[in-house]
């Protein structure tokens, strides 16, 4: 019974976006399409000047260009921090860790004004590199937390033994920690990919020009326009949802672990 | 581990980039915002004349802000209660070794992977009540068809419902998360505990009521913290689904901050709203972080 509630929106999304224009009517929202038609997707993707629709293809690529480097960099930083905060604790290291983690809970409204000013000063405002930079910075808390918890499960005796054999800080990181890090990286990268792809606020504030907006901002503009037929909006929504959904479908196990880590169960 | 001098320096170098970024972009920026909120900056051109708490006093006399605060309170309470109730129920149902458990779990959890914008766009159409000319649409039409027409509502278009209609998609998106947390918690409880109770003659209901539920309390606390901080900051979903709504009936402080700052250029006022939001979240999170760290070390 509950499953119906969760699947209802999926049904509407699929049923509507595959209908041909002749069939689309709000009255028939719950009817299945008679013929499968890809017209809505074509227009949502490529745009159609006569309908005043700007396609989402450019924005889809913007999101790809921004999500890949931001995910990689923030994961790497998280791994380095996690290594220190789990295996090389120092005086007050837990306090420093808590101060870092607090950064993932703040309402980003409380940093937006300085962020715009600073990005303008350093010439990154309104650009994809600017967005990459911002996502890297605000991704540090969660990536650090996940890696710190993940590395805590690596037995410290292993590291002690390596030290006796003469391995130092960097050798241990490279030869012991990194080789066992793949599941950790999978969890962190899926988490980061999903949250950066789904971000709206940073994209909205940093990317004013439509040509560099990420896909969530462009979808909101598309859906906010009264001229755009709703089957095109639904097709656009589906296009926006597909990349994180694919990750969820194929790597759901890691996704779930990221979720639970994000709930702080192991601080 | 014992550290040599070289290792101490390397430790320091490893975390330095992140620490500097966090100090500047989180704490520095928060301080900067706090300072802006005490100035007179209300135009494109900055004006850093100090005006004390004037912006805060103005805010609490501002009707839109009052409505926004009330809305976020109503939203948070409903969202919390419903998500936790549904999440717990789903977790218990799934724990009862149902067939196709994996399929159901995936169905409940997949909305978590989707952007609030996508959710908002889809639910805006589903909760579109229609007009006199079009007749009932969306969910209302469905309710008519299955004979539950009395449940029909104007949803977010009705100022008396307003923000409460946004709770539905929010629960749709987040209750699977609560389920996952509870399910992990239930699976972590040793089976011997409930088996021993059953040997002593406890009914299934009693096992849940007196053994499982009390042990799940830390998870409930975690869920409350996570859901509340998401709810206080809710922005994307409201923007995509309704906007501020008629008479600000769907408005929330995060949206008011965005409009004030980036549309109205009232930077100082926007900074004051942001600071109030931050304080609300901090009051919730800081004790939780402190508590968590003590247990962790």
Image (cartoon, coloured by chain):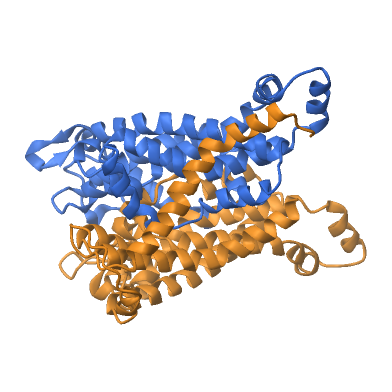
Chain colours: A blue, B orange
Q: Quadrant of residue B40?
A: bottom left
Q: Residue furthest bottom?
A: B61
State the residue at coordinates (75%, 19%).
A167
Q: Tell me if residue A197 comes above or below residue B249 in the rendering.
A: above
Above or below, A142 against B159 in this view is: above
- Residue A27 x, y percent position in the rendering: 23, 57
Tell me which residue sits at (45%, 47%) in the image.
B24
| Residue A131 in view | yes
- Left or right for B74, reference A127: right
> B186 and B201: which one is in front?
B186
- Give the image location of residue A182, x and y in percent: 62, 26
Spot occupied by residue B201 in the image (x, y as percentages of width and height) = 90, 67
The answer to whether A174 appears left or right of B162 in the picture is right
User: Is residue B226 toward the left or the right of residue B72 in the image?
Assistant: right
Depth check: B236 or A143 in front?
A143
Regarding residue B252, the answer to whether it shows in the image is: no
Relative to residue A240, is residue A175 depicted above or below?
A: above
Residue A262: image location, x then y, percent: 58, 48
Residue at the (83%, 30%) spot, across then down: A157
**Observer-nearest residue: A218 or A46?**
A218
- Residue extending farthest to the front is B5
In the picture provided, is A48 more to the left or to the right than B66?
A: left
| Most distant residue in the left direction | A50
Count of number-bearing discs: 0
């Amino acid at each position: 019974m509950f499953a119906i509630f969760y699947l209802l929106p999926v049904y509407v999304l699929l049923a509507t976006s595959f209908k041909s224009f002749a069939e689309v009517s709000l009255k028939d929202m719950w009817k299945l399409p008679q013929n499968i038609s890809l017209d809505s997707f074509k227009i949502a993707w490529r745009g159609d000047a006569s309908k005043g629709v700007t396609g989402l293809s450019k924005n889809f690529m913007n999101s790809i260009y921004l999500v890949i480097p931001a995910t990689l960099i923030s994961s790497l930083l998280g791994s380095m921090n996690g290594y220190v905060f789990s295996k090389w604790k120092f005086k007050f290291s837990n306090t420093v860790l808590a101060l870092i983690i607090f950064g993932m809970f703040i309402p980003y409204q409380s940093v937006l004004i300085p962020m715009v000013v600073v990005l303008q000063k350093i010439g990154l405002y309104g650009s994809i590199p600017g967005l990459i930079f911002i996502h890297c910075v605000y991704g540090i808390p969660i990536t650090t937390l996940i890696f710190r918890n993940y590395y805590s499960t690596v037995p410290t005796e292993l590291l002690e033994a390596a030290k006796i054999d003469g391995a130092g800080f960097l050798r241990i990181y490279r030869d012991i920690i990194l080789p066992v890090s793949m599941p950790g990286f999978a969890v962190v990268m899926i988490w980061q990919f999903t949250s950066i792809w789904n971000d709206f606020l940073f994209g909205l504030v940093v990317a004013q020009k439509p040509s560099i907006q990420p896909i969530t901002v462009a979808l909101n503009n598309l859906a906010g326009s009264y001229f755009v037929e709703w089957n095109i909006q639904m097709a656009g929504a589906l296009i926006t949802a597909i990349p994180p959904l694919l990750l969820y479908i194929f790597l759901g196990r890691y996704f779930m672990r990221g979720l639970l880590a994000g709930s702080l169960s192991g601080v | 581990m014992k550290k040599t001098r070289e290792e101490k320096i390397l430790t320091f170098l490893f975390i330095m980039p992140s620490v500097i970024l966090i100090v500047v972009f989180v704490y520095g920026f928060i301080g900067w915002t706090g300072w802006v909120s005490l100035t007179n900056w209300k135009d494109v051109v900055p004006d850093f004349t100090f005006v004390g708490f004037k912006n805060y006093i103005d805010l609490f006399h501002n009707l839109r802000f009052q409505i926004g605060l009330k809305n976020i309170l109503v939203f948070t309470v409903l969202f919390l209660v419903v998500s936790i109730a549904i999440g717990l129920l789903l977790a218990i149902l799934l724990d009862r070794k149902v067939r196709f458990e994996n399929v159901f779990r995936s169905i409940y959890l997949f909305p978590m992977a989707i952007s609030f914008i996508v959710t908002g766009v889809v639910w805006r159409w589903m909760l579109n009540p229609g007009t006199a000319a079009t007749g009932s649409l969306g969910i209302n039409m469905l309710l008519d068809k299955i004979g539950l027409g009395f449940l029909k509502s104007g949803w977010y278009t009705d100022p008396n419902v307003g923000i409460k209609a946004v709770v539905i998609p929010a629960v749709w998106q987040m209750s699977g998360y609560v389920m996952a947390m509870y399910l992990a918690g239930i699976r972590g409880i040793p089976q011997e505990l409930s088996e021993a109770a059953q040997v002593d003659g406890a009914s299934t209901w009693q096992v849940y009521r007196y053994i499982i539920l009390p042990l799940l309390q830390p998870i409930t606390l975690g869920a409350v913290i996570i859901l509340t901080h998401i709810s206080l900051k809710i922005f994307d979903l409201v923007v995509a689904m309704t906007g501020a709504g008629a008479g600000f009936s769907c408005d929330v402080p995060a949206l008011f901050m965005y409009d004030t700052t980036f549309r109205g250029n009232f930077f100082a006022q926007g900074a004051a709203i942001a600071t109030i939001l931050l304080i609300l979240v901090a009051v919730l999170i800081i004790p939780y972080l402190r508590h968590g760290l003590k247990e962790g070390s």
